[in-house]
Image (cartoon, rainbow, N blue to C red):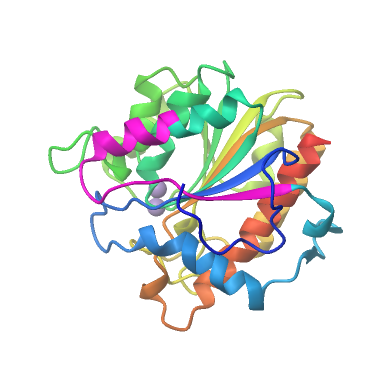
Amino acid sequence: MIELNQFLCSQKSIDHSSIIICGIPYDCTSSFRPGSRFAMPEIRRVSEFAIEEFSFYQNNSLEDVSFYDAGDFPLMVGNPQNMVDIVRQEYEKYLKNQKKIIAIGGEHLITYPIFLALKKHHQPFTIIHLDAHADLRPGYLADKLSHASVFRLCLDEGLSKLIQIGIRSGTKEEYLERKDNSRIVACNHITELGQYLKKGENIYISLDLDYFDPSFLPGTGTPESGGANLHDFIQLLKILKESRIHLIGADMVELAPQIDPTGNSTVFAAKILRELILLMNHFCS
Ligand code: MN
Ligand code: MN
């Protein structure tokens, strides 16, 4: 691990923390604008000055949560297969120690090795996928390992249920697959989510930040208008708590800080990370 600044009030020791946050700085299959490999260092930097530990939405403070910022996975720029192998190995080390992980991309392909690691420990489980894009392509420009194919890869490797929310862009084939594939639930609005969840169901959250409208979060590689706002996301947290699911992990991907020179997108993402840590803590206690 490469030691960097810590996110807010991260614990000094991993031993007493059941929640781990880590950066996965990989963006080599980005199709339009790369830069998401710089997300986590920037999130840590702005968190110190721009984010309060307390959440008005969840009536809880990070100061009352034991989480550990484990730094960034050691990745080289380049070959996606190397990234898949390294992320899977590193992630499995934490799973063996009963840790719950919130991974910060990087691009969306990082969810694939996380899925491979998790499926050995939690079968079956459901991924709630928040995104502007369906990410169901069979490959992108002849490369099967692509951010645009990440859930195609997970389904091919046995993912039992994928709930997609916020999707508003993709190919005709992706559109039809969302209708016809019985393992995919196309959730049109966050308010419908509760009806698709069962008490005790293992849930993993994969949040592509272009789920949000670019008017709120322009700092992402492939912005897509017509997206969600913060209050939609807060509603998601409430629905998950009320549904009494079992949260097994989460990721937040595709923040490209330098695309938004105001820095507001990074502050937005840091706030979302605070809410994810508090959500995870709810399901730990
Ligand atoms: Mn995506
Ligand atoms: Mn996307």
Which residue ends up furthest to the bottom in the rendered image?
A: 262
Is residue 224 something that shows in the picture?
no
Residue 250 placement: quadrant: top right
Q: Looking at the image, which is closer to me, 42 or 216?
A: 42
Query: How many numbered discs, if any?
Result: 0
Query: Residue at (41%, 56%) from the top-left corner?
Result: 254
Is residue 102 something that shows in the picture?
yes
Residue 14 placement: quadrant: top right
The relative height of residue 151 versus residue 27 in the rendered view (above or below) is above
Q: Which residues are magenta?
A: 67-89
Judge from the rendering whether residue 273 lies leftward or rightward of residue 223; answer left or right: right
Percent of width and height locating residue 77:
25, 51
Judge from the rendering whether residue 52 lies leftward or rightward of residue 253; answer left or right: right
Percent of width and height locating residue 10:
69, 56
Query: Residue at (72%, 24%) from the top-left corner?
Result: 198
Judge from the rendering whether residue 69 lies leftward or rightward of residue 185; answer left or right: right
The relative height of residue 171 versus residue 218 in the rendered view (above or below) is above
Percent of width and height locating residue 67:
70, 48
Q: Looking at the image, which is closer to me, 212 or 186?
A: 212
Percent of width and height locating residue 238:
77, 47
Q: Looking at the image, which is closer to me, 279 or 25?
A: 25
Query: Residue at (41%, 77%) from the top-left corner?
Result: 260
The relative height of residue 115 versus residue 55 in the rendered view (above or below) is above
Query: Residue at (58%, 27%) from the top-left corner?
Result: 95
Q: Answer whether residue 143 is magenta in the image.
A: no
Q: Answer whether residue 82 is magenta in the image.
A: yes
Residue 219 placement: quadrant: bottom left
Position of the C terminus, as image quadrant, is: top right
